[in-house]
Amino acid sequence: MRHPGAVISHRSSLEMRPTGGTLFLTGSYDATESIHGLTIRLIRGPGPLDSDMPFLDGYRSSNTRALIENLTPTRTHDVSKVLPREEIEHRLVMVFDEEGRRGLIKLRKSAEALADIPEFETGAQNLIELIGTLLGTRKAELESRIAKARIAARPFDGACVQLFELLVAELQKTEWLAVSRQTPPLLKHERQALAFIDTYFSNYIEGTQFLLEEAQSIVFDGQIPTHRPQDAHDIVGTYQLLVDETEMKTSLSNFDQLEDLEALLVRRHHTILNGRHEKNPGKFKQHRNRAGNTEFVAPELVQGTLEKGLTILRELETPFQRAAFAMFMITQIHPFDDGNGRLARATMNAELNASGEAHIIIATAYREDYLGALRRLSRNKDPVTYLRMLSRAHEYTSRLDFADFDALVDTLRRTNAFDDSGARILKLP
């Protein structure tokens, strides 16, 4: 090689051949020379980086560096040193198709690492914008027909998807990858006890409050109080879902089509709220809903945002990751008029149950921790508090013994699970 230490760069690095008889290199000075009919253009720029690949007596730009070089504005020459923008977009779509969101996220991180190099700053930002557009978190103008088709899916809530991305970035850390609390298979009466206690607390959080003994009579004896029939049906519907073995072994990761996810959510929601016809059980919302200062996804964006969420969830590796993500996804989208919290928690526990993991029960004494952690994630973009909250509830539930119902209730009382005064903390069994 006539320029030892130079870097095969720009379009030459991506195409690995001369273009129009010209090979582009980056070195410490500008030069142009011809050798046996081949024109070599040496462009002054950054020398070899740790990520660049040795090649003959020099180097070849890493894929990330080459993409950045090709997205850096340049003056026009007879033979351009950069590929057309359309071609770069096409290459990014190929990464998406072959490696999924994880591949694009990895590429984005490596681009961010090179953005501090002055010569690469503009190109890196252009690359980050394109990747974000394909991921659904940014909106750069696209030129490639293929790239446009790739994102021309249903409209979605970009801010909501950004929160999904934030949560997933935290979930990928070793601390959360390691979370696993397997439990032995439960006998029928143990499954019923688990489903009942989960039902009781899940409804209590939503304001459907009965004495424990009243809830037992409603679920196991069919005694519907005449003064609160709808609340009682909420209890029954939630229990019917949580005690359904088939339903609670169905993971969202089994699905790759939005239609399948929609059918699952509609079925589960209908089961929970089948006693409240005015709440449109099993029907997606027609009007935007809110809780306090939090405004949820607009009705016309629900399907597209669910679709984005499903794509992300399918790439998560562990039951805890999927459970934490599924719960937040449903809570943040709020796809139905009512019952979204109960649906979100049931879906979270189905993800865990499908892999033999302990459930996550949110006891009454843990209500404010739970709601506060959700608010910190949705409003302050803090996923750590949310995941720590879930992990502690997971640990708590994993220590419960469902074999003897009276002993179980005694444990719940001793650990302050039923306390709604806010004065006592939930203690681990």
Image: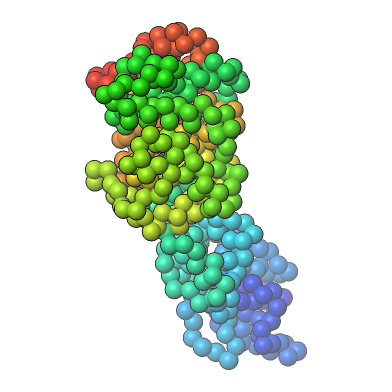
- In this picture, is 311 found above or below 149? above
User: Which residue is more in the foreground, 138 or 328?
Assistant: 328
> Residue at 48% across / 43% down in the picture?
265
> Residue at 60% across / 88% down in the picture?
79
Residue 29, percent from left and from top? 55, 79
Residue 21, percent from left and from top? 69, 87
> Residue at 40% across / 49% down in the picture?
284
Residue 86, percent from left and from top? 55, 77
Residue lying at the far right of the rendered structure:
36
Residue 37 lies in quadrant: bottom right
**70 sits to left or right of 375:** right
- In this picture, is 306 found above or below 209? below
- In this picture, is 33 found above or below 113? below
Residue 301, percent from left and from top? 40, 57
Residue 383 lies in quadrant: top left
Q: Could you tell me if residue 342 is visible in this image? A: yes
Q: What scheme was used to colour the molecule?
A: rainbow
**57 sits to left or right of 365:** right
The C terminus sits in image quarter: top left
**270 sits to left or right of 54:** left
Q: Could you tell me if residue 119 is visible in this image? A: no
The N terminus sits in image quarter: bottom right
Number of numbered markers: 0
Residue 31 lies in quadrant: bottom right
- In this picture, is 396 found above or below 276? above
**342 sits to left or right of 379:** right
> Residue at 41% across / 20% down in the picture?
222
